[in-house]
Image: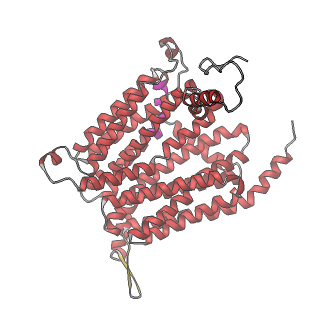
Amino acid sequence: MIEPLLAVPKVVGVSAPGSSADRLQDAVGATRPGGRVDSIFGSWEFFKLWVAQVISATGDWLGLIAIISLAERISDGSEGTAIALVLAARIAPGFFLATAAGVIVDRLDRKRVMLFCDVGRALVFFALPFVDSLFGLILASFVLEILTMLWSPAKEAVVPNIVPKEKLTTANSLNVAAAYGMFPVAAGIAALLAKLSEGFADEGWVNTWQFNEEGLAFYVNGLSFLATAAIIGRIHWARRTREERLGAERGSWDLGGAFRELREGWEFIAVNPIVRAVNIGLATGVIGGGMLVPLGAIFVDEVIAGEGADFNLILFALGTGMAIGVLTASVFQTRINRARVFPLALVVAGAGLLVAGSASILSIVVPMIAVVGFAAGPIYVLGFTLLHENVDDELRGRIFASLLVLVRFCVLIALAVAPILSELLDGLSDWIWGREIALGGLSIFVPGVRLTMWVSAIIIVIAGGLAMWSLRAGSSAFRAETEAEPSS
C-alpha cells in the first residue's frame, strides 16, 4: 500500500502501538490537510469557504435586522408599509430573476463574481447609515439582493470542485447550518450593538458618522463582507478557461419560470396525502415564523412599549429556540414517530405564537417565542424526512424543487404582506372597538399587529390539525399503493 505523501515517516525498527512515534504521527495528521479538517469538511479549501459562509450569513442576518429597524424609524408613521416594501425588495428579485442570475454566473469567472459581490455588498452597507429616505432603503435592498443572487449560485457551483464526491452530502448539511444557524448569533450581535450605541455620547462625530443602533450594525456588516472577500481570495480550485465558460450550457432568461414552478408545485402537492400535509405544514410554518421578523419591531413598539434591543432579544429567542429544536429533532429522529410529531409541532408553534401575541410583558413574550422556535425547527427537519421516505425517486427532485419555490413564495407573503395586513387590521380595530376590547372589568389592547399575530397563530394551529388528519388517513393508503405496484 502506498503511504500518503504528507505522512510522517515511521521510525524503522520495533515501534509498538501507542509509542511516541505513533502519537507524533497522529498529532501531525490531525493538523495537516488530510487530518480532522479533511475528515469533516472534505478539504481545506471547502473549510475556508465554509468559514466565509458563516461570516457572510451572520452579516446577512445582521443586515436584515438593521434594515427592518431603519425602515421602522424613517417610515414617518407607516411602519408596516415601509417594512413590507423594503422586504419585498429583498425577496422579489430572487423569486423572479433566479434563472437569469444562474445564466450570468455560468458565463463568468465564479471567483471574480464572488469577490465582486462581497466588495459590492460591503460598499452598500457602508453607505446605508447615511440613507434617510424610504426610496433609498428600498434601492439599497434591491441592490443587495441582486448581489446575493449572483454570489449564491457561484458558491454552489464551486463546491463540487473542492469537495470529494463522497463528502458532498456532508458539505450540503454544513452549508445549511452556516446559512440558518447564524440567525440567533446575528440577533445576539444586534442586541449587543444596540446596547453599545446607547453608551455613546451625543457628540458631533457620533452623529456625523451615524454611530447609532443601525449604523453600528451596518458598519460591522460591511466589515464582515470584506472579511469574506479576503477569505474567498485565498481559496484555490481549478478554474474554467474562457472557452469553457463560453461553451457552458446556455440557460434561458425566463422570468415566468418561477410561476410555472409554483403551479407545478401545487400539482405535486396533490400526489398523495403525505406530500400534501408536509407542504401545507412547511408553508404555514414559514408564514407564521416569518411574520415575526417584520411584525416583531412593531409589536415591541406598540404593545410592549420597549426599545430596539427588545426586538433583537425576541429574534434571538426565536433563533435559539429553532436551533435547539432542529438539534433535538436530528438527535432523536430515529426514536420518534415523525408522522405524529410533525403536526404536533405545528400545533405547539401556533399555540405558542397565540400566547406570545396575547402577552404585553417582555418576560412572557420572550420565552413563548423561544417555544415557537423550538417547535418550528423540527417542522423543517421532520417534513423533509417524511418526503424522503414517502416519495419515489423519479419524483423526488421535482417535488423538492417545487417545495422550495413554494417556501420562498411563503417567505415573500410573510415578510411583505404581514405588515400591510397589520395596518389594515389596525384601522379596522380602531373603527370597530377603538383598538380596545372590554371583557368584564378587563380592557384588552387590540392593535393591528396583535390581531395579525393571532390570525397567523390560528392558521398554523388549523394547518397542524389538517396535517395530522391527512397523515393519519394517507400514510397507510400510500404504502399499500406502493406495495401493490408490480415489481420490475
What sort of colour scheme is used for the picture? secondary structure
Q: Is residue 230 left or right of residue 75?
A: right
Where in the figure is residue 410, as x and y percent of width and height?
A: 50, 51
Where in the figure is residue 208, as x and y percent of width and height?
A: 15, 44
Where in the figure is residue 195, as x and y percent of width and height?
A: 29, 56
| Residue pictured at 38% horizontal, 73% vertical | 446
176 or 51, which lies in front?
Answer: 51
Magenta run includes residue 98? yes
| Residue pictured at 72% horizontal, 23% vertical | 14
Where in the figure is residue 187, as x and y percent of width and height?
A: 40, 52
Up the image or down, 17 lies above or below 417; here it is above
- Secondary structure mostly seen in the magenta stretch: helix
Magenta run includes residue 239? no
Single out the residue that lies furthest toward the left: 204
Rendered image quadrant of residue 404? top right
Bounds of the magenta span?
A: 93-105
